[in-house]
Amino acid sequence: MGVFTRPDSPWYWLWLETAPPGQEREKTDIRIGTTTAQRHDSRQLANDLYHRRMNEIAARIHRLPQGLPKAPTFAVFAKWYDTNVIAHHKGHERERDILRRLVQAFGALAIDAIDPATVIAWRTVRRMTGTTVEHFGGPKGKPRTFPPPTARTVNREVDLLQQILAAAVPKYFDESPLEDLPDLEVVDPIRRTMSAEEERRILQELPADLRAILLVGLDTLTRLKDILNLRRRDDHGTHLDIVDTKNGLSHTVPVSTRLRLALDAVPVDARKPEWYFPKRRVARTERDRRGAIAHALKRACQRAHVDYGRATFGVTFHWGTRRTGATRMIRAGGDKAIATAQRIGNWKDPTVLIGLYQETITAEMRAAVESVGSPQTATATPGRLAIAKPRAKTRRKRA
């Protein structure tokens, strides 16, 4: 019978003679069409599909090698990727937040139907659309709408999408369709550091444990996640062991004199004596723990009359600790301090620190700008520019 139609259906149907009993009849997604041209073209598509399906059945019957299997939807494959890949990443919470957004956008599509044009159109809408949280802060919270994401955030989301599609190679396609998709252009901000005076005022507004947390980040360049995971057994007096880090490289950092005093001032919690900061670990997720520290720092900044948050070019925990500490080290030691700061902060790649060094105002830079207005570089006629007069052109006499 091959291709046939039914009076109760607008789609073409297939009769697959060699299919198992009860599976011979198969509905297609090809509409019959209304005009003569549409019916002709759709009939041709249905015939092509019929021959392809018959070949697939024959290949299974005779155990012949087949082509690529039918691609699953993005939602199905994303669930597999979450279980087998994301679950093993240290940043799995952040990746799962991104994954939920990607599933909302692409979940119904087959993974081999996601092409550059589809992603480019999606990220254009994404850059223009804010996010509304119906109950911000909890079940009884009020609605809150956040502004559209930055280009950097959208690039990070597309990066995860690319990684997911790359995991489907070569089973469902030969190469990821997003392999050569360029990122959106981003503008690197001038990042904030915390001044010594701001540090003094903020520390006065913090309780003992938060004061120690801030100084661990500032003096040892340790990330907040690793600070909250600090155990008392990791403290060896003159140095701390930082284990289970973001990049997987455990390391040891020296303890400054003031940090030693701050750590000694943190009381031991009788209920959880193994942790240094158990009260700051009560939130269920690491993201919520970091958020609680951010809110505590924000309140301290308000009391200390220090701007907080990137929107106001204010202090944040990361900029106020890891970035500020590394910048101070580089200012004190110049480019020679980059290697030392890299070891203390446990950066695999010194690129970040080189960028900090390039942003640092050095003594040579100050001398250079001061030299512009120095007496040695002033012209003979103060207040006036010496402009060379153009030499008059003379005609050459022809011989």
Image: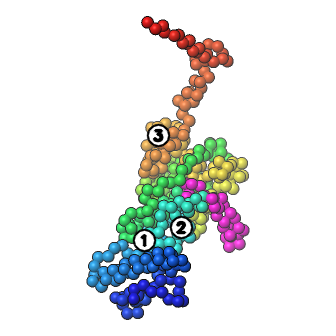
> What's the amino acid at mark 3?
Ala
Q: Reading the chain from its start, which is encountered first: label 1 or label 3?
A: 1
Task: Say whether residue 90 is visible.
Answer: no
Q: Nearer the viewer, mark 3 or mark 2?
A: 2
Circle nearer the N terminus (1, 2): 1
Quadrant of the rendered image containing residue 8 = bottom right
**In contact (CB < 8 Å): disc 1 and disc 3:** no
139 w.r.t. 348: above or below: below
Quarter of the image where the C terminus is located: top left
Q: Is mark 1 on a helix, strand or loop?
A: helix
Q: Nearer the viewer, mark 1 or mark 2?
A: 2
Residue 69 included in the magenta stretch of the image: no
- Mark 1–mark 2 distance (CA, rounded to whole Å): 17 Å
The span from disc 1 to disc 3 (Cα, nearest Å) is 41 Å
Residue 210 is left or right of residue 39, and the answer is: right
- The amino acid on which the numbered mark 1 sits, given as a three-letter code, is Asn
Location of mark 3 (residue): 337
Q: Do the CB atoms of the residues marked 1 and 2 lie less than 8 Å apart?
A: no
Amino acid tagged 2 = Leu
Q: Which colour scheme is used?
A: rainbow
| Magenta segment boundaries in residue numbering | 128-154
Q: Name the residue under label 1.
A: 84
> Where is residue 318 drawn, in percent x and y?
57, 52
Q: Please indicate whether residue 223 sits to the left or right of residue 307 in the image.
A: left
Instruction: Kindly state the secondary structure of the residue where label 2 is placed.
Output: helix
Residue 207 picture location, percent across and down: 65, 56
> Residue 267: where, in percent of width, then height?
59, 60
For the point 47% across and 77% down, the residue is 40
Q: How packed is label 1: few (under 14 Cα within 10 Å), some, or many (20 or more)?
A: few
